[in-house]
Amino acid sequence: MDEIYGYFPPSAMPPSKTPMLTLLKQARAYGLGCVLATQNPVDLDYKGLGNTGTWFIGRLQTDRDKARVIEGCSRRHGRGRRPRRGELEKRLSSLGSACS
């Protein structure tokens, strides 16, 4: 689902939020995948992000985008150890540009 921001905002409870969380939880339980895309990481709800197993992060255009991704990854309850904020910031800062 592209441009998910309107369906999965980080605030309030729009009618679409409960079905989206259910979809993510049930898909994960049965080993299925969902692809949710947005151009702005600030647009997504953390409950939804917490129910995703893999994040693909493209170009982060602003420091705020980078900070939000670092915050989300630091909070995330995944398998194994959670990366530290400094480690995440160093990794994100070292990524090169795909476009020259």
Image: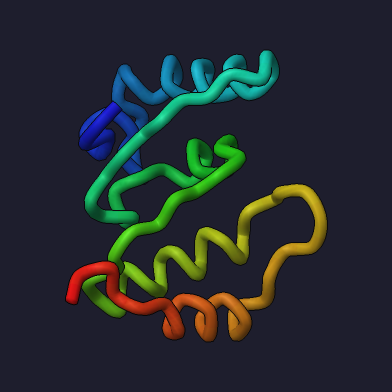
Numbered label tally: 0
Q: x, y (%) of residue 39?
A: 23, 51
Q: Dividing the picture into quarters, in which one does residue 65 lie?
A: bottom left
As drawn, 56 above or below 19: below
As drawn, 3 above or below 61: above
* Quadrant position of the N terminus in the picture: top left
Q: x, y (%) of residue 52?
A: 56, 38
Q: Dividing the picture into quarters, in which one does residue 51 lie?
A: top right
As drawn, 60 above or below 26: below
Q: Nearer the viewer, residue 45 or 61?
A: 61
Q: Nearer the viewer, residue 12 or 67?
A: 67
Colour mapping? rainbow
Q: Is residue 21 left or right of residue 74?
A: left
Q: Is residue 4 left or right of residue 48?
A: left
Q: Residue at x 61, y 40 (%)?
A: 53
Q: Nearer the viewer, residue 38 or 42?
A: 38
* Quadrant position of the C terminus in the picture: bottom left
Q: Residue at x 28, y 68 (%)?
A: 98
